Image (tube, grey):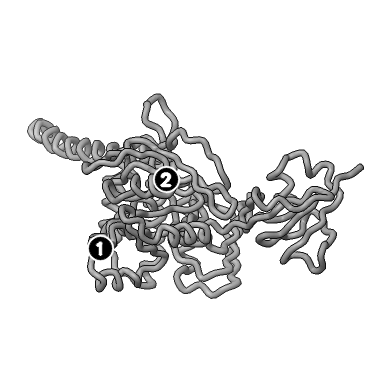
Amino acid sequence: QSAGRAGRPEVVGVRARGERTTGKEGREKDRETERQRGGKMNAEQINLKIKEIEDEMARTQKNKATNAHMGLLKAKIAKLKRQLVDPPGGGGGGGKGDGFDVNRTGDARIGLVGFPSVGKSTLLSVMTGTFSEIAAYEFTTLTCIPGIIRHQGAKLQMLDLPGIIEGAADGKGRGRQVISTARTCNVIVMVLDAAKPLTHKALIEHELEGFGMRLNKTPPNITYKKKDTGGVNVVQNAPLTHLTPDTIKAICKEYRIVSADFIFRCDATMDEFIDVIEGNRVYVPCIYVMNKIDAIFLEELELLDQVQHYCPISGNLKWNLEGLLEKVWEYCDMVRVYTKPKGTDPDWNDPVVLPRKKRTVEAFCNRIHRDMIKNFKHAMVWGQSAKHRPQRVGKDHVLEDEDVVQIVKKV
């Protein structure tokens, strides 16, 4: 018995050491999970976690049986990328990228985005007359340089942003500041070197999408409403070929959505569904400007013509700059409305410029002065939106391009 008792501690000791080892590994995993849930992981750990999940997605066979699992993994990546874009507040000095301190002026803002030394500063200097340092080395522009273009009576603010490098969304090369400023623009002009455009295009799109920007896309037509009880309810007004009920529930579970109503009016993908839940995506039109076309052959230019949303130019030789300006104005999607004081001719030189999505008489009044709508009685409208000239309308009347408006106030 004494020999048995003497031998027993060794066995227990081996088992105890094994348990302690397993327990330590478990505690490490628990701490990692808590750090992830509490948002305490640093950028390096988050990127490592994203890489692990992407590797798992690459290993997973894509079929109907793994559809819900793929949706869960994509939701995890989206949550981790949100921590990179908008880190939780704390005592550290990092924080999210707040952009450059440039006051917003004019009717629309256009951002010049691209790799270093592709001709952004040359384009700004030629189009706006603003001096932006130009040199034969990379990263000549270290901050945001604004310039103003006047086109068809509208004032457009153009921003020359520092060059983006790979890993910009993670903060490399002031990338977060550059992309944070780009998020505030009405139109993105992606300047590409015509000698290697498609490689640069894919890399820049990856960086911008990682920061919550969606280029040349429209928001998915999905209505999402949280509620207190009732579970997750899905109403399909259009057939869903990319999402299954299990996938939707798996993504909702990852976001801890217990009760909500979803109405699908489009055939949404997993990524679009996750974008709706995240709610911080920015949808921006983008023009791909192929600069330095004077350095390539005509056959190469014909191949580039197959790229959608593209515009070929040469900043140095000033080729096709008018065509670029017209394309920028088209992508801004704005209307010009002229004012007409009583008893005088319309002011054709200084139109009120409104976005096409908000072009009512009320928006017109608010653009002139925020107190004007308080004394609004009715408006007289001449132009395409009027059934007869002039037409007496209320504040909800929708205006068209080059309409003439006269506001009548209450006495």
Q: Earlier in the sequence, mark 1 or mark 2?
A: 1
Residue lying at the far top of the rendered structure: 91
> Of residues 315 and 17, which is closer to you in this image?
315
Residue named by callout 2: 82
Q: Position of residue 305 (x, y in %)?
A: 34, 71
Residue lying at the far left of the rendered structure: 3
Residue named by callout 1: 59
Q: Secondary structure at mark 1?
A: helix
Residue 26 horizontal side relative to residue 332, left or right: left
Q: Residue at x 48, y 55 (%)?
A: 284
Q: Position of residue 210 (x, y in %)?
A: 37, 50
Residue type marked 1: Arg
Q: Indicate the quadrant containing the N terminus: top left, top right, bottom left or bottom right.
A: top left
Q: Position of residue 63 (x, y in %)?
A: 35, 72
Residue 201 shows which numbered tag?
Answer: none
Residue type marked 2: Arg
Q: Is residue 266 visible?
A: yes
